[in-house]
Amino acid sequence: MEPNPDYLPPTQKFIAFLKEQFEKFKKTPLTLPVGAAIIGLAFYAMLLYMLNSCLLPILPPFVMLLVFWNFGIKRVKKLLLGGIIACTILMIIETGFFVDVYSNYEPVVGHSEDYILYNGMVDPLSGDAQTAFNFTLDINITKDPTVPITNVTVMIIGLNDMRNETMTLALRDNETASYYYMTTISEPINQHAFWANVNDTWYLAGDFVDGEEAGAMGPVYSSTWEIAKPLLYFSALQAYVQFMGIYTMVVGMIWWTRRTRRMREKQLNDWETKRKDAVAKAPKEDTRVPSLAKAMGLEEEEDSFVCSECGADVPGDAKACPQCGEKFD
């Protein structure tokens, strides 16, 4: 029994079916919103797994173009419209992502690398503009209870400014020197760290990220909207200025490439048209081919020539070809 040439394995049939449905989908008006939703999901995955990567600020514009292009959206106006829709979704996703991060962060007890400074913290962790936040820090003086301690400072880092405040000694014994500083906070999102000079050596206490000292999170306002307002602003800047800016430049390069290609094609067509017109307007005698004898210099130029229609030798003074009857001007 001969194999059926039209037979396809089930897997290939299924792939062919999916391709067919995808081609139909590309002709529907759903390509823009569905494409923007896919871009949003990809961006959320980047925030989860690439938050500290240097590629995060530049990948989304190229993901946007890749998705829209594969969805059959290739006109410049539709690409730009899709970019605006996608950037709006990215702005909302980024805002929501960081609101959740700042609303549910885990408290961190700051310390220096060698634990000379330790128990650096703020209480309470969240509040509002009227809340009195108490920053506290302990300094280990077990080795020398009389060691000089100066410039004990809490550094409060907000979104728009940074404060360095001198802390007050609360208690000192033979093991520990405890300091505090109480204040209200005007910024909804903050970090903090501690400095101190112990026996002429500077120490920094904070959180440790990948082995490096960094500011510890807090305090943060308890109102979700107060947290969201500055994040929405910064997310909009990143979405519409950074992401959309890169995306628009790439789309502009595509538009310019298409335009220059069309200009080249038009120029070539114009040249071809002009060449054909010049050939068509040329007089008949210009297209006569001299005979071989003339070409070799064995005949006078006016004696004969070759008919351009049939190739026969024609006398120079003939008005028509004696073989095919072609008339000459």
Image (cartoon, helix red, strand yellow):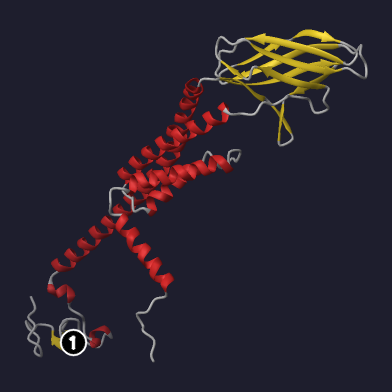
| Residue placed most toward the observer, 159 or 17 | 17
- The kind of residue tagged 1 is Gly
Q: Position of residue 91 (x, y in %)?
A: 44, 33
Could you tell me how many numbered marks the image carries? 1
On screen, residue 292 versus residue 80, left or right, reads: left
**Could you tell me which residue is drawn at 46 percent across and 46 percent down?**
62
- The quadrant of the rendering that contains the C terminus is bottom left
Q: Residues within 10 Å of mark 1 (few under 14, many from 20)?
A: some
Q: Position of residue 188 (x, y in %)?
A: 55, 19
Q: Position of residue 144 (x, y in %)?
A: 93, 16
| Residue placed most toward the observer, 324 or 109 | 109
Give the labeled residue for mark 1.
Answer: 311
On the question of residue 14 being in view, the answer is yes
- The quadrant of the rendering that contains the N terminus is bottom left
On the question of residue 264 being in view, the answer is no
Q: Position of residue 96 (x, y in %)?
A: 48, 32
Quarter of the image for residue 301 reads bottom left
